[in-house]
Amino acid sequence: MPMPSSLLRQLSGYGLTTAHILYRLPDHPSFLQSYVWQEYDLAPDFPELIRFLDFWRRDLDGPLHSVRVAHQRLIGAAECRIAAAEFSLN
């Protein structure tokens, strides 16, 4: 099934989510490494972020230290209106 366009996702309530992830290096657990993840997601449940973090815990070696999340809806209901009429000028 093809992924819907970002505009369609935004119109259905998705917003841009950025997660700043700190994780421990597998060989040097006293060192922290930083990773930034960004995707369209639904607040406050964040199903895409949860899916990514589940993948991280299951398949990657670096244990998570912390995750900081920022979310912003880019298109709101008041910002998108359907045109009632169209006029052409010659």
Image: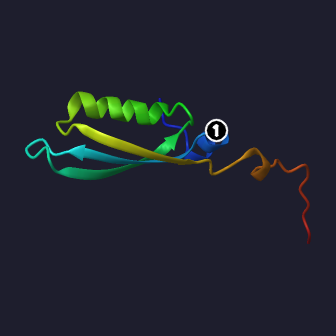
Q: Residue 33 in the image: state x and y as whole percent.
A: 23, 52
Indicate the amino acid at tag 1.
Answer: Gly
Going by the picture, which residue comes out furthest to the front? 30
Q: Which residue is mark 1?
A: 13
Residue nearer the viewer, 11 or 31:
31
Determine whether, in the image, residue 80 is placed left or right of residue 70: right
* Residue visible at 79% across and 49% down in the picture: 78
Q: Residue 40 in the image: state x and y as whole percent.
A: 51, 43
Determine whether, in the image, residue 84 is placed left or right of residue 41: right
* Residue visible at 82% across and 47% down in the picture: 82
Q: Residue 4 in the image: state x and y as whole percent.
A: 54, 38
* Residue visible at 64% across and 38% down in the picture: 13
Category of crowding for the residue at label 1, using alpha-carbon neighbours closer than 10 angstroms: few (below 14), some (14–19), many (at least 20): some
Considering the image in quadrants, where does the C terminus appear? Answer: bottom right
* Residue visible at 43% across and 36% down in the picture: 49
Q: Residue 79 in the image: state x and y as whole percent.
A: 76, 52
Q: Quadrant of residue 77?
A: top right
Residue nearer the viewer, 17 or 30:
30
**SS at circle 1:** loop
